[in-house]
Image (cartoon, rainbow, N blue to C red):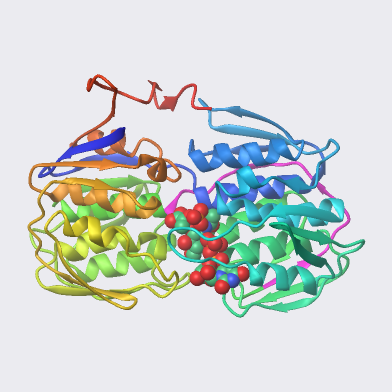
Amino acid sequence: MEEIIINGGHRLTGSVRIDGAKNAVLPIMAAALLAGEGVNQIENVPLLADVLTMRLVLEALNVHTEFDKRDRVLMIDATGRLSEEAPFELVSKMRASIVVLGPLLARLGKAKVAMPGGCAIGSRPIDLHLKGLRQLGAKITQNNGFIEAEASKLIGAPIYLDFPSVGATENIMMAAVLAEGTTYIDNAAREPEIVDLAIFLTSMGAKITGAGTETIKIVGVSKLNGTIHPVVQDRIEAGTFMVAAAITQGNVLIKDAIAAHNRPLISKLLEMGVTIDELPEGIRVVGPEKLQPVNVKTMPHPGFPTDMQPQMTIAQLMADGTSLMNETVFENRFMHVNELRRMNAQIEIEGNTVLLHGPAELNGAPVEATDLRAAAALVLAGLVADGETRVSKLNYLDRGYYLLHQKLSQLGADIRRSDVAEDGAERPILNVVGNNVSAQN
Ligand SMILES: CC(=O)N[C@H]1[C@@H](OP(=O)(O)OP(=O)(O)OC[C@H]2O[C@@H](n3ccc(=O)[nH]c3=O)[C@H](O)[C@@H]2O)O[C@H](CO)[C@@H](O)[C@@H]1O
Ligand SMILES: C=C(OP(=O)(O)O)C(=O)O
């Protein structure tokens, strides 16, 4: 069983480099399907399990890919004869693979993608994706667990999203870039990853304005070409390190972090008494002796990100008093709470709100991750717990963090990753070469 083993109580100091964003690279990899000519060169690609899964999805669609893991460059050549079917085995492994639906439909006039199903944090329907694609003229049916979409021609249209869904905005954008005429997406998602996707598509030859605002305008073009694109920095990984510094009375420079992408987190950490300096070289975070309690509500961007909610609850637990966390985006994103209770945390759940009673005196314990950000939160809890914490089910962590344990160790945490073999002996699981992982797929 792979575990991260942490002995809490160490101050974090130094600087840390953040990788490219998972939530930007996945739709960008799907958008590469739109290039009928030329090869796409995606740079700053994070070495994550989800990236490897999306690469398999592309290869199942007959796309040729080459991944230079040392330099983090992924070449995607979608100029060959593509298949329209994204298989169940891969889509069921990663919900985000649903974003191949829009580009496949635009490129081939048809697509068959397995229904992604729910996941631990919520039921996560895709009705808004399908409604938008239908408004562009697609005929969509659901048969035997697959979504089948067809359109001899996509035609631009005004589309209003009932909720600013990130995935629906991306799927619709990627279909509309090759549609005839103009599409407006109203109440669009405004996340920085939407902006990065729009930059990528524009560089491929698409005509998009308004990404990052609530109305995105897309004027369809007849073809798109391959381009070169560096993936934007992962604001959630950056935010996770900001919380790590805040709770350990640390002093950490998050290199090249983009403050504008983490405004809601910065604002809440300042309220808690954390010192934050926005410098040309990044964001410096200095944790105080005592954190002040603070109430937080998750919202679509530019609200407080749900992907930082579990990590933020650790800062709230360490604060001097009771804090509230209200989760409004996903209906089941408090699964880390039961594990934290095993570490002696005093937490009450009332509907979609938790009351976190601080300052917690956390005890190290064996705990299990239940989803990606829960895994990160448990690692953070281990940094401030008394004694040894062992976090298992690291497959969740590997979806979104590359060598988190190594980066924390370089900042002074007592943390290691092990694979406990049959004979009980521990051995490192990742074959690390410099800042690279070899033979991971
Ligand atoms: C790969 C990726 O980028 N994942 C991110 C993306 O997920 P994802 O794109 O799945 O998230 P959405 O913004 O679509 O979902 C937000 C809410 O809208 C609901 N909804 C969504 C679509 C739909 O058709 N119908 C519907 O009801 C969902 O169930 C959820 O309650 O944005 C989420 C919200 O910031 C993040 O937590 C995820 O990390
Ligand atoms: C929920 C997340 O991702 P996904 O949408 O890929 O499950 C996340 O990154 O926290």
Count of numbered labels shown in the rendering: 0
Residue 225 lies in the magenta-colored region: yes
- The magenta stretch is 216-235
In this image, 209 relative to 261: left or right?
right
Q: Name the residue nearer the viewer: 308 or 229.
A: 308
Q: Residue at x 69, y 40 (%)?
A: 58
Quadrant for residue 360, please give it: bottom left
Q: Residue at 76% of width from left, 41% of height from top? A: 226
Q: Nearer the viewer, residue 121 or 289?
A: 121
Q: Position of residue 440 (x, y in %)?
A: 49, 27
**Residue 102 in the figure: left or right of residue 346:** right
Q: Is residue 191 above or below residue 10?
A: below
Closest to the observer, 140 or 22 = 140
State the residue at coordinates (38%, 66%): 263
x, y percent for residue 224? 81, 49
> Which of the 4 quarters of the picture holds residue 106?
bottom right
Residue closest to the eye, 273 or 100: 100
Position of residue 393 measured from the top left corner of the image (x, y, whole percent) = 34, 42
Residue 5 visible in image:
yes
Quarter containing the N terminus: top left
In the rendered image, the vertical position of residue 420 relative to residue 197, given as above or below: above
